Amino acid sequence: MASLNRVTLIGHLGADPEVRYTQNREAIATIRIATTETYKDKSSGERKETTEWHRIVFFNRMAEVVGE
């Protein structure tokens, strides 16, 4: 049985998408997205931020769309 895993990332694009093609002319696109979490430190009560970078890879038609 097929299943679908879905992830939603809301953040900032780190650079323009990079699109390249394999020898078989299949498109591959890569993007990097930064997501930032803001929280309050329990011990100091200070507001802090943590940023994580996510590398996302797209293939074939979706890669071409990302590159446009």
Image (cartoon, rainbow, N blue to C red):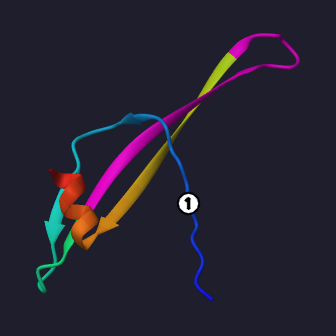
Chief secondary structure of the magenta span? Answer: strand
Q: What amino acid type should be assigned to the residue bearing mark 1?
A: Arg
Total numbered circles: 1
How far from the left and from the top, in percent, is residue 2?
A: 58, 84
Is the N terminus in the top left, top right, bottom left or bottom right quadrant?
bottom right
The structure residue drawn at horizontal position 87% and vertical position 19%, both measured from the top left corner, is: 42
**Apparent side of residue 65 relative to residue 55 in the rendered image (left or right):** left
- The outermost residue toward the right is 43
How far from the left and from the top, in percent, is residue 59?
A: 29, 70
Magenta highlight on residue 66 = no
Q: Is residue 20 above or below residue 34?
A: below
- Residue 19's quadrant in the figure? bottom left
Q: Is residue 15 above or below residue 7?
A: above
Which stretch is magenta?
A: 29-47
The structure residue drawn at horizontal position 33% and vertical position 37%, both measured from the top left corner, is: 14
**Apparent side of residue 22 relative to residue 66 in the rendered image (left or right):** left
- Residue 55's quadrant in the figure? bottom left
The structure residue drawn at horizontal position 13% and vertical position 86%, both measured from the top left corner, is: 24
How far from the left and from the top, in percent, is residue 26?
A: 18, 78
Magenta highlight on residue 40 = yes
Element type at marker 1?
loop
